[in-house]
Image: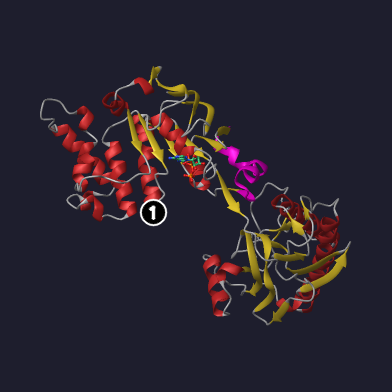
Amino acid sequence: MITIENITGGYSKKPVIDQVSLEVDTGEFFGLLGPNGSGKTTLFKLMSGGLPVMDGTVFLNGKSVLHMSQLERARHIAVLSQETNVSFDFTVEEIVRLGRYAFQKGLFKTLSGRDKELIDEVMEITSITCYRHQPFHMLSGGEKQRVLLAKALVQEPEVLLLDEPTNHLDIKHTFDLLDVLKRWQEERKLTIFAILHDLNIAALYCDRVGILHEGRLTNVGSVDVLRKRSELAEIYGVETWTQPHPTLARPQLLMNPHKKKQEPLSLLEDYSLEQTEDAIRLSFPQQLRTISNGVAGEGIQWMKHFVNFHVDKQYDSRTPKEDAEQWLLKRGLPVEQSIGMMTAVHLENAVMKEEIIHGSAMLVLVTAGTGNAVDITCRSTETAGEKIGTINTFVFADAHLTDGALVNACMSATEAKVKALHDEMIRDPVSGTMATSTSTDSLVIGVTQQGTRTPYAGSGTAVGSGIGQLVYEATKEALQMDRSWKEARP
Ligand SMILES: Nc1ncnc2c1ncn2[C@@H]1O[C@H](COP(=O)(O)OP(=O)(O)OP(=O)(O)O)[C@@H](O)[C@H]1O
């Protein structure tokens, strides 16, 4: 365990680092963050003996690090600082070998067989074996960084102090290097104290972080401290948003540039509509913030084009996403900016409604078939087996919604659809009870993100109730059209 106790120091009488205390557990990866000039490198130098302390001390497992000889310190602590200047023209291998110096015995300090094996292993995992015989000064900044990391790792340290270890590295080498460190941390209980600038990298790799601000350590804790938007805005002067990583329980930050304001979008005037037998396409000149379960473009996204494709009753639905993406491409629509849904319902039965409700412009498009109508409260997963019935709902609103409000909006649209199914007496053909949906319904909510940001879009809000009213009317009418169409073609 490293214990930093009230450490104070700097370059003149006025200290840069002011009474910093911190404990880093054995086997922990601690990330020191902070804006330029906040004192990170100064603290690093005070900890590693590169700068004399004015007050306080640093302990490693209870023993004062600052009173250790250089050789003794090198047996426990490896340092990778920002300075990559190497005075002699050593080869890569010679530099890495220097890392074993503190452990070499005898008058001539020769390398043991184990030392050589370790050097080979570390050169391999830091991907520098191919530069083995090259002069260090002929390497790129990123390659030098990896060589110096290899030198630090062959010390087999208990503690590794790193000052911006990835600042010269491309994305692949950044992740490779941090993966190596993480593996050593986990397998060898290596304690890592690293200065990091990239908050997203810190969020992915650190067990705990702390932010240095004007020489004082603040916000020490799990990486969830990076969710504190107002603190980050105060310390860094940048507006941030936190998003969850899609597969890891770790936050990721998005930054807001101070960009020029976009032309306002008039939802009901600025869209274009194209309808053929094969597809209905609605496009906007700007991307809308969307939440959707469409076969193409699902999730939370920014999208411009919204397409409902007609498919044959016999459509083989094994690769719906790929098919929808191909159809988008055939129409010259970029997959990254388009939502695609499918329906076997004839598109002349689509219903579109637009209105300004409670001051918000709304546009709703629905196609409804009920062959696969289902009562979700019945336990059977058996369906009628007919593939023609699905309800596809496109909802557009001139509103500025949080992600939570987008979920609210989905609920509002769904509640309205269920009411329409109920009022049209649509039944689950298997259970005979009232249907709540069809088995393959799709929905998109698209909002302009203009105006005042609101965290709610449920039934108690103007936006939610507007969505509810229009979706109800459009779904009811679409269900009636579907019924009439079927009755006309028994
Ligand atoms: N050798 C030096 N002599 C005098 N002042 C220094 C010296 N090195 C740094 N400073 C000052 O100490 C303060 C902290 O610098 P430090 O390098 O520790 O910041 P940092 O947080 O590591 O910044 P960065 O993110 O830019 O690397 C700064 O105001 C800097 O000007």
* Residue 467 spot, x, y in % from top left: 81, 60
**Is label 1 in a helix, a strand or a loop?**
helix
* Residue 256 spot, x, y in % from top left: 63, 56
The residue lying furthest to the front in this view is 13
Nearest the eye: 33 or 286: 33
Residue 463 as seen in the image, left or right of residue 192: right
Residue 240 as seen in the image, left or right of residue 206: right
- Placement of 105 over or under 211, stated as above or below: above
Residue 198 as seen in the image, left or right of residue 77: right
Nearest the eye: 56 or 390: 56
* Residue 321 spot, x, y in % from top left: 55, 65
The image quarter in which residue 346 lies: bottom right
Write down the residue under mark 1.
172
**Cβ at disc 1 under 8 Å from ligand 1:** no
Q: Residue at x 85, y 60 (%)?
A: 466
Q: Is residue 214 magenta?
A: no
The part of the chain drawn in magenta is 219-242
- Placement of 103 over or under 358, stated as above or below: above
Q: Residue at x 41, y 17 (%)?
A: 62
So how many labels did they put on this image? 1
